[in-house]
Amino acid sequence: MPIIDPQGWGRELFNKQVNQTKNDPHRNIPITAFPSLLRKDWLSLLYKQGMLPAGERFKQEWQEWEEQVPMKLLQEKYIEYKSLFEGPEIDVYLFPVNTSDRKFMKTMKGRNGLTFNSFIFLFFHKDIAPEELSALLLHEYHHACRLDYHHLNEQNISLLESMVMEGLAETEVKRIVGEEYVAPWMTMYDQEFLKRWWERKIKNKLNIIGRKRQMQYLYGGKYGFPKWLGYAIGYKITESYIANRGSQDHISFVKKTAEEIYRGSDYVQ
């Protein structure tokens, strides 16, 4: 089942963290598809991405979240998006977000997602609106489709593709779920502001390869870069492409290269 029911493995993870010993500080995470990192590293990643801590203090919050996960909605939306984008079969793991973390609750609207080639992580709070959850799944599944179709991964992806991928995903959120559910950081800057940063810091960096080397350009917040700079520019690139070339069917945008979209946008050099 692509949408993994969290009640089984989530409870196992929780119990192992609660019952861990001094000699075994990183018990097995009950997810088996992660060969590239040690399980302790995956657990650290989950916490960094916003997972509610698995400990006795949070037991009730975990249970309340598990009871309210809208599995039927997620299954239906997964099937809809898979058909719409002619996408791959991919597992989706669900996590409660850390409601004590101001960054995730305010800046990220209580939700976050992370996509790899063979699985997706979704983090969200128990009271998330159905449309917000649909938008989150849509955004991350669209990433999975582009990674699959263009044979991309964390190591070989270019900065241009990373930006366009983010822009395309939110463009589809706008088209399918509604403009009000587009992530706020996509539209937080005006065109003139973004064009200045594009000319100064971005346009000559488009061929940077590997996500680890792209963080300051995508997320900003360091070295003087505005927060979410690359995301906002990627959204403007895709929006201007549509304005110039017209809207297309959903699968066409999955298959179109980042270079094609860039060349048809207002950002072309």
Image (tube, rainbow, N blue to C red):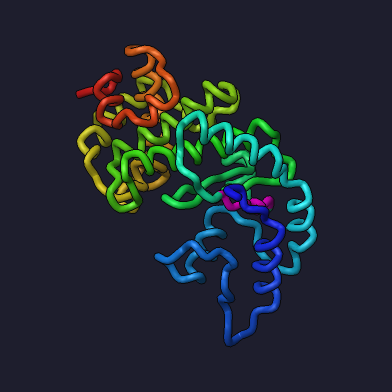
Q: x%, y% of residue 207?
A: 22, 41
Q: x%, y% of residue 32?
A: 52, 65
Identify the residue at horizontal 30%, vertical 20% (top origin). 265
Identify the residue at horizontal 58%, vertical 22% (top origin). 178
Residue placed most toward the observer, 191 or 22: 22
Is residue 183 visible to the viewer in this orientation of the structure? yes
Is residue 227 visible to the viewer in this orientation of the structure? no
Identify the residue at horizontal 33%, vertical 13% (top origin). 245
Q: Which residues are magenta?
A: 92-99
| Image quadrant where residue 109 sits | top right
For the stretch drawn in magenta, the main secondary structure is strand
The tally of labels here is 0
Outermost residue, bottom side: 23
Q: Is residue 142 left or right of residue 18?
A: left
Q: x%, y% of residue 177?
A: 59, 25
Quadrant containing the C terminus is top left
Q: x%, y% of residue 235?
A: 41, 27
Q: Is residue 177 left or right of residue 232?
A: right
In the image, residue 94 lies in the stretch drawn in magenta: yes
| Image quadrant where residue 266 sits | top left
In the image, residue 138 lies in the stretch drawn in magenta: no
